Image (spheres, rainbow, N blue to C red):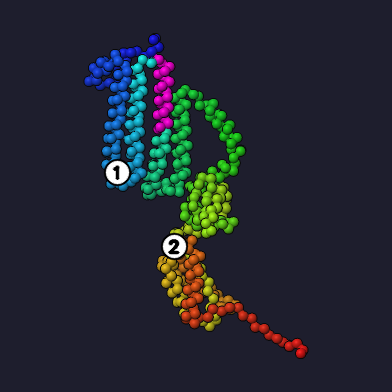
Amino acid sequence: MSDSVPFNPPLPDWLPSWLEGVWSLLADYPILLALAIVAVGFCLAFLVRLFILFWGLKMTARTNNGSMEKLIRLGAGVAALLLGYVSLVTALHVLPLTDFILTLITRALVSLLILQLMRAALKASHMGLEVLGRIRDRFAIVEERTLPLFELVLTVLIVAIGSYALLQVWNIDATAWLASAGVIGIAVGFAARDTLANLFAGFFIIADAPYKLGDYVVLDSGERGEVTKVGIRSTRLLTRYDVEIIIPNSLMANTKITNESGGRWVKYRIRIKVGVAYGSNTDRVVEVLEKVAREHATVCRDPSPRVRMRGFGDSSLDFELLCWIELPVHRGLVSHELYMAIYKALGENNIEIPFPQRDLWVRKLPAG
């Protein structure tokens, strides 16, 4: 066969001198030579994987970082995978195959290698972001709320690079594909404007982080609930009625949001309005209200509860008890318990709670 690979393959330049005799001995038997190359390559891949795992896990043993350990195992697997594929391709070149078959099998193997490398790169990107997220002093931008954004960007890049490499392996011109993708992209952009608006709004919400998982937010339209998921397309709120509200990100990005869990801490301040009768001992009123707040188990000690007199009402002296609770979700229950305790405490201290009264003056009684 004129177009076949010779049955006596020449000595490769990279072969050590002490293996030249073995190569010459097996050169008359191409199948045995190919099997020997594959066996040596797989053994070398196994040893390299063990070496990387041994030293890599030994270096990270003190860090107690699960993501780093997974990353090292993944890297060891990729190194072994590369050596295994190199041995397979090398073995093909010593077999008596035609140029067409040799090229076809080689491209198929390289394509499988690229797909496996893409899969490993996707896993490595996720693990790498987790590792960077734990290094707060250097990579503060990579954290739990921004992981989906960075993961999506890296996924697009890895898939794009891998797809381009596959096209190059099979000698396919990517220019026509890119032009077609541009036309299709314009058509999809017009057909899915709302979806794309939600998509980009999701990127900005994740990057800007006006709220995060677990926050209690109040929308301009009146909905209030706990943020249970911040997705690429929508945000989910769980209300106090255990009803989940799904709001498109485009609406979330263009509405006024009150984040009750924002600020310096998650704590939430509640206001308890109390009116007492004119003539009451105001100093005693302040002491009673502060004592009730301090004795409540859920009210925070720091900042400490405080009482402020707000003004002179029509029938009462108006006071307001200001205190903090750990979570905004507790405000309803804590307000109820404080109102009950204040009513009892004021009664025990003979402090009257007034109610509106009207005096009726009769200028003249009707006849009879």
Vertical placement of residue 329 versus 95, above or below:
below
Nearest to the observer: residue 12 or residue 31: 31
Magenta-highlighted residues: 98-117
Within 10 Å of the Cα at label 2, are there few (<14), some (14-19), or many (20+) other Cα atoms? some
Quadrant including the C terminus: bottom right
Report whether 1 appears left or right of 244: left
Residue on which disc 2 sits: 326
* Mark identifier at residue 60: 1
Can you tell which quarter of the image residue 315 is in?
Answer: bottom right
Could you tell which of marks 2 and 1 lies nearer the N-terminus? Answer: 1
The stretch drawn in magenta includes residue 22? no
Q: Residues within 10 Å of mark 1 (few under 14, many from 20)?
A: some
Residue 347 place in picture, x, y as percent = 49, 80
* Residue name at image x 28 percent, y 25 percent: 40
Distance between mark 2 and mark 1 Cα atoms: 38 Å
Can you say whether 40 is above or below 238 in the image?
A: above
Three-letter code for the amino acid on which mark 2 is drawn = Glu
- What residue sits 35% from the left and 24% below the top? 88
Q: Is residue 11 visible?
A: yes
User: Does residue 217 appear in this view?
Assistant: no
On whether residue 102 falls in the magenta region, the answer is yes
Q: Are marks 2 and 1 in contact (CB under 8 Å)?
A: no
Q: Please name whichever residue, 255 or 218, is drawn nearer the observer in this view of the structure.
A: 218
> Residue 44: x percent and y percent?
28, 29
Q: Which of the 4 quarters of the picture holds residue 196?
A: top right
Compared to 345, does 89 lie above or below? above
* Image quarter of the N terminus: top left
Taking the image as shown, residue 359 lies to the left or right of residue 113, namely: right
Rendered residue at 55%/53% (across/down): 245
